[in-house]
Image (cartoon, rainbow, N blue to C red):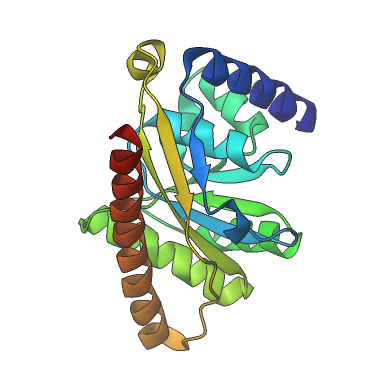
Amino acid sequence: MKTVYKFVANVVKVILKLTGSKARVYEEQNLPKEGGFIIACTHTGYVDILNLGVAVCPREIHFMAKKQLFDIKGLGWLIERLNAFPVDRDNPGPSVIKIPSQLLKEGKVVGIFPSGTRNAEGTDLKQGAITIAQLAKAQIVPAAYIGASNAGDVFKRGKGYLIYGEPFYVTGKGKEGREEFTNRLEHELVALTEELEKRVAAEKK
């Protein structure tokens, strides 16, 4: 599986470079150098997943993905070999917490893509990220991405931009702690997106 991941990552990196869509990364020093941690990144399309995976190389990200994707012939086989693990968002079970918690304890990176806006699913996913971080005692790194989001954008040479926030631990206890830090994550993602938009606008002047 590692061979497939690294091969695909290298191919994606070449394609993104050739098309000018490889993300410019800001505040890369905020990524922990070792140990397991969660990246909670805003999500606009599949290109942000590709850019995030490339940006973190040579470390590999284990992405949380909705289980329906694994039922698609060919795609399921591929994403499983790209370290994705299935989550049933409609009927979440113990595996929603168990699988990523085990990965974190093994020192691996877990990628979760909660929405950057305040919608019901986004809030659930943010709380899921916080719950996992709380139980696994792992750091969570908020991140924001703007720019190319699909194949059309890539082949139009649309650029991508990625920024990492400062990592933090979920120090709050129980349900109240999860709610407090879910709100913190929401605010961090919004603030990072706004900061990234300002930087991109300043560069274009």
From the viewer's perspective, tell me whether residue 4 is left or right of residue 163.
right
Q: In the depicted view, which residue is nearer to us: 61 or 96?
A: 61
Farthest-out residue, left: 119
Question: What residue is drawn where x is 54% and y is 76%?
Answer: 134
Quarter of the C terminus within the rendering: top left
Q: Residue furthest front?
A: 205
Q: Going 54% across and 49% down the picture, which residue do you hit? A: 111
45 in relation to 60, above or below: above
Residue 179: x and y, percent?
34, 78
Q: Position of residue 163 (x, y in %)?
A: 46, 49
Figure label count:
0
Question: Is residue 21 at all visible to an observer of this figure?
Answer: yes
Query: Which corner quadrant holds the N terminus?
Result: top right
Look at the image and tell me whether residue 74 can be seen. Answer: no
Position of 13 relative to 39 (above/below): above
97, 159: nearer the viewer: 159
Residue placed at 67% from the left, 30% from the top?
81
Q: Is residue 76 left or right of residue 172?
A: right
Kindly indicate the quadrant of the structure image that contains residue 100: bottom right
How far from the left and from the top, in percent, is residue 35?
A: 74, 62
Q: Give how far across and how far down residue 106 sits, in percent.
A: 76, 59
118 displayed left or right of 90 = left
Closer to the camera in the image, 16 or 86: 16
Q: What residue appears at the point 34 percent right and 18 percent down from the top-left corner?
A: 153
